[in-house]
Amino acid sequence: MSDNQREAGTIILDPTHASFAPEETVHDLGATHFIGIGGAGMSVLAEMLHEQGVEVDGSDREPSAKTDRLQSLGITVEFGQQAKNVEGKNTVVFSSAIKPDNPEIVAAHEAGERIVHRSDILALLMNAKRAVTVAGAHGKTTTSSMLAHILVNAGEGELADPSYAIGGSIQGKDGAILDGGHAGKGNVLVAEADESDGSFAKYHPQIAIITNSEADHLDHYGTQDNYRAAFVDHAGHATKAVIMCGDDEGNLAVLRALGATVAGRTIVYSTRNAAELGDLNGATLVRIESESETAESGAEHFTLHIPGGLIGEEERRIAVTLTVPGIHNARNASAAIIAAALLGMDVERASAAVTSFLGAARRFQVRGTVSQVTVVDDYAHHPTEIAALLDAARRRYPQSKIRVIFQPHLFSRTRFFSSEFAQALAKADDVIVTGIFPAREKQEDFPDVTPATIVDEALKLEHEPAKDWIRGVEDMHTAAPMMVMRAHHGDVIFTVGAGDITQMDEVILHALEAHRWDCEG
């Protein structure tokens, strides 16, 4: 926290404020306390600092799988946030979910302790590594997980044993779930660059991947133009290369706004050709060709056409097969493979390694099948993500009815994109919209936003079946058994959203077992 903020006697938590000089390292932190240490992004950073010998502890509201893991590593976690938790600390770390009146923030402020945003810690970790960031409204976790998977399984020398800071878990072999944070001995750090609060402006990676720039987080940015401008700024911080998806119109707008120097080191990957894309502002195009998916297999196939001069003098056509379905994953894998090649890995070795990637946790994650009804969980929480998910579902399960329980994430996002959510959900056969997961927001600030906000928009659409295909049910514990009672054998039930809707998967599976006779018709 800056001196003028202290002198004014106010507490200003600005996630965009850079707290460290470029020459500082994690060893300058001293005893470090994380407020909300059980959060997906916070727990990863705490673990990485702990692995590098920094004295770390933290607090959270209640126990969770994340706090259990941290405690198993020897990291102290206090439950309940109170002033005494920050006594004697040198650095206190907050996330954008933490407010200035938090008792630990107030105590740290009064004690003169250094208060920094989680992005400052990630920026510090990047200073000592060859960093690759992944930014975008959607696709961040999957793309960064794919690149980490490639490096872990095929990296040699300095590319082996990478560090990674991914805001979610990864599906490992044999169903094991791997944590999204690791401090490796190699010289590469793969990190999600969260754009939601503008804090990714602090990062200066070697390689910046931008999956898309479709407007989101307008509660922070206000307008689409402001949102895209933040990506233009972020791209300019990459010292070696920018890798961008050309299938997103927002990205194309960002590309055309880049200065000549940055655009000249930008690589665009796309299913479209140069004529279809138009002005590439001097960037290099890598084509995704012959994309297809074998029905019901979940196997995604495509060819990556790499022009001469990018990773060698000759042009290359690399065949890629993915275990995870959907054209959106072909795009994610293309970015990961290109990044691995730019880091120095043989491109064919990288493409072979990505085949065994099973997906980030909660990304088209099959949770079980009972009485021929399959339950799938997915983190999709933006309309475009939901549309991509349901398109992939149709290809994976072409003969099935697709039933969705969707929990919106954030009141502001629900208000901004209610019509778009309705259109995306219309790709399903049967939908229940539950109460909204508030995250950092409060219902009283959005009294008019409810499940009906989306349902009312959906009912304006033409949809088959036209009657009763979507409804709002506030309590997800009511919605889950309701959906089970509607299911028949061969159906697929998706739990969708970035909140705690994932908890309903076990509820649904148990209800299917108890009511399996309802699934025979």
Image (spheres, grey):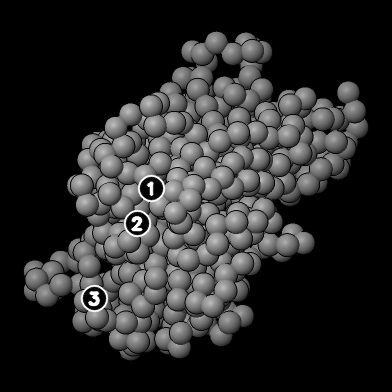
* Dot 1 and dot 2 residues touching (CB under 8 Å): yes
Viewer-closest of 148 and 390? 148
User: Hey, what amino acid is under mark 3?
Assistant: Pro
The residue singled out by tag 2 in the image is 241
Which circle, 3 or 1, is nearer the viewer?
1
Residue under the point 39% across and 74% down:
129
Residue 31 occupies quadrant: bottom left
Q: Residues within 10 Å of mark 1 (few under 14, many from 20)?
A: many
Residue 474 occupies quadrant: top right
The residue singled out by tag 1 in the image is 267
Q: Is residue 157 left or right of residue 106?
A: right
Element at label 2: strand
Residue under the point 26% across and 39% down:
281
Between discs 1 and 2, the one toward the N terminus: 2
Q: Residues within 10 Å of mark 3 (few under 14, many from 20)?
A: few
Please state the horizontal and vertical placement of residue 183, each as a whole percent of the image.
Answer: 50, 77
The residue singled out by tag 3 in the image is 22
